[in-house]
Image (cartoon, rainbow, N blue to C red):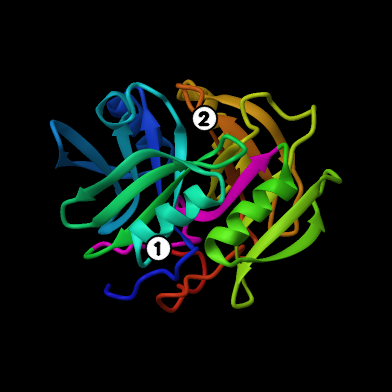
């Protein structure tokens, strides 16, 4: 695959974990992923794949992030990483991790946005990002939980040129859909006190599952925790869960795509 995601599209998700092998075992058991290692600096990067398709990465927090367990990091595609980093800083962001070259992939960096959420920037070379969207066990949406939706929107619109559409969540919260050229690519959720304290100011991925109830049961069997849900949505019921290391994510029983893959023809049916 040579086509790249457009600048501003979520292109990759990476779990910054204190125990990458344990994390890999959990997600492999939950989603049916396989995992392989690729060398990175003095350690290894865990590449998660569904068949031949790379779907996520797992990195040891001690290897690149000085032990800070950021949880799931959303990486946004950029065509000029240095320029994007400069623009992020002008808009009030702080560079956390300077650009690093990933062999057989591209170059990535991480930034702390003005509201305290970590995001990644990724300039692709041979690997454009996740190989599939919307398939079972793969990424289908990315959402920022924030206590300052207007400030967050200003930052990301300034950084990527998003259009913003105001909506309302199924729980009556403010919700902004961020779009590129008319295509929804990510969401901003205004948090309320009913949501877990671990969630605000954090980008979280949505992964598609075939049956939400059985997936939540499986999360518990594997040592994870149910945090909130099920919550109805126009795209299917969803649930917020923690993995065994308290990294939150969404599971959704997807009934309609939240975003399309702008690089390739989206697969029909359920995906596999």
The image's mark for residue 219 is: 2
Say above or below: 187 vs 97. Answer: below
User: Which residues make up the magenta segment?
Assistant: 127-146
| Viewer-closest of 8 and 85 | 85
Q: Position of residue 96 (x, y in %)?
A: 40, 36
Q: Position of residue 74 (x, y in %)?
A: 47, 47
| Residue 68 visible from this viewpoint | yes
Spot the residue most to the right: 172
- Predominant SS of the magenta segment: loop
Q: Position of residue 67 (x, y in %)?
A: 35, 21
The image's mark for residue 78 is: 1
| Residue 12 visible from this viewpoint | no
N-terminal label among 1 and 2: 1
Q: Position of residue 244 (x, y in %)?
A: 46, 22
Whether the magenta-drawn stretch holds residue 216 is answered as no
Q: Check disc 2 and report its element: helix, strand or loop.
A: helix
Q: Check disc 1 and report its element: helix, strand or loop.
A: loop
Quadrant of the image containing the N terminus: bottom left
User: Which of the two discs, 1 and 2, sits closer to the camera?
Assistant: 1
- In the image, what residue occupies the spot 21% across and 50% down? 101
Say above or below: 272 vs 40. Answer: below
Q: Residues within 10 Å of mark 2 (few under 14, many from 20)?
A: many
Q: Disc 1 versus disc 2: distance between alpha carbons?
A: 34 Å
Residue 31 placement: quadrant:
top left
Residue 39 placement: quadrant:
top left
| Viewer-closest of 201 and 242 | 201
Left or right of residue 216: residue 176:
right
């Amino acid at each position: 695959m040579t086509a790249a995601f457009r600048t501003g599209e979520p292109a990759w998700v990476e779990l910054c974990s204190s125990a990458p092998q344990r994390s890999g075992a959990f997600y492999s058991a939950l989603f049916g992923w396989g995992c392989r290692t690729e060398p990175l600096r003095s350690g290894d990067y865990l590449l998660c794949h569904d068949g031949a398709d790379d779907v996520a990465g797992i990195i040891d927090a001690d290897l690149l992030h000085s032990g800070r367990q950021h949880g799931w990091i959303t990486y946004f595609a950029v065509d000029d990483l240095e320029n994007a980093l400069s623009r992020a800083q002008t808009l009030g962001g702080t560079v956390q991790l300077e650009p690093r070259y990933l062999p057989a992939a591209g170059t990535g960096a991480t930034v702390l946005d003005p509201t305290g959420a970590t995001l990644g920037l990724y300039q692709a070379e041979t690997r454009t990002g996740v190989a599939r969207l919307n398939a079972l066990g793969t990424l289908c949406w990315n959402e920022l939980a924030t206590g300052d939706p207007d400030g967050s929107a200003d930052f990301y619109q300034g950084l990527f040129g998003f259009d913003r559409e105001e909506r309302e969540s199924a729980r009556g919260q403010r919700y902004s859909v961020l779009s590129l050229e008319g295509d929804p690519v990510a969401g901003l959720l205004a948090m309320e006190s009913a949501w877990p304290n671990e969630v605000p100011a954090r980008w979280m991925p949505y992964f598609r599952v075939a049956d939400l109830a059985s997936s939540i049961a499986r999360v518990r069997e594997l040592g994870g925790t149910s945090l909130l849900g099920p919550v109805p949505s126009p795209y299917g019921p969803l649930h917020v869960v923690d993995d065994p290391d308290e990294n939150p994510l969404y599971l959704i029983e997807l009934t309609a795509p939240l975003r399309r893959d702008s690089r390739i023809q989206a697969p029909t049916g359920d995906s596999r």
